[in-house]
Amino acid sequence: MLPLRRVARVVLLLVGPNFLLLAQQNPDCLKRTLVVNVRDRTGKLVDGLNSSSFRASLQGQQVRISSAIVRNGPRRIVLLVDASGSVNKENLEWATARLIAGNLLLKASAELHPALVV
């Protein structure tokens, strides 16, 4: 007769992968939220949009848009600057990038809660 611990290991080995597959198929993992601004040709924000106003695809497959909600709350802008050597091998453009980033953050409205990530 097999010891109880060994039986438990065998059961986990056989059943465990099925639980992992179920966890990977969690519906919350299949939903993504995107924040978008839609403007017309003159730069004005477009009102009255709903989920049927948008189309999306992922790897060539049509994706269903489940909702489109207008939110009039506080906004946040995050400026991401890639300072890695692969992008800026000789620091030739680093001073320009710093100047642009600094000016952008200085000119940004405090309501946007600006942040800089380098």
Image (spheres, rainbow, N blue to C red):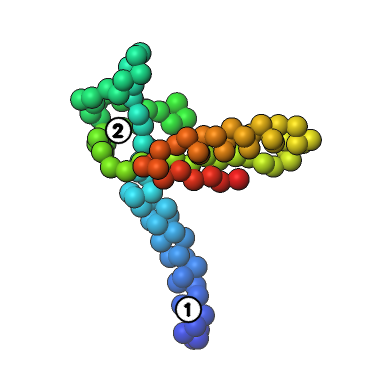
Q: CA distance from mark 1 to mark 2?
A: 46 Å
Q: Residue at x 30, y 24 (%)?
A: 45
Task: Name which quarter of the figure residue 11 lies in.
Answer: bottom left
**Count of residue discs:** 2
Say which amino acid is labelled 2: Ile
Q: Position of residue 1 (x, y in %)?
A: 49, 86
Residue that numbered label 1 is attached to: 7
**Residue 18 visible somewhere in the drawing:** no
Image vertical order of residue 23 relative to residue 40, above or below: below
Badge 1 marks a residue whose secondary structure is helix
Image x and y of residue 82, in percent: 63, 40
Q: Residue shown at 66%/31% (left/top)? A: 96
103 left or right of 69 in image: right
Nearer to the camera, 13 or 73? 73
Q: Is residue 51 left or right of residue 43?
A: left
Q: Which mark is residue 65?
A: 2
Residue found 49% across the figure and 45% down from its top = 115
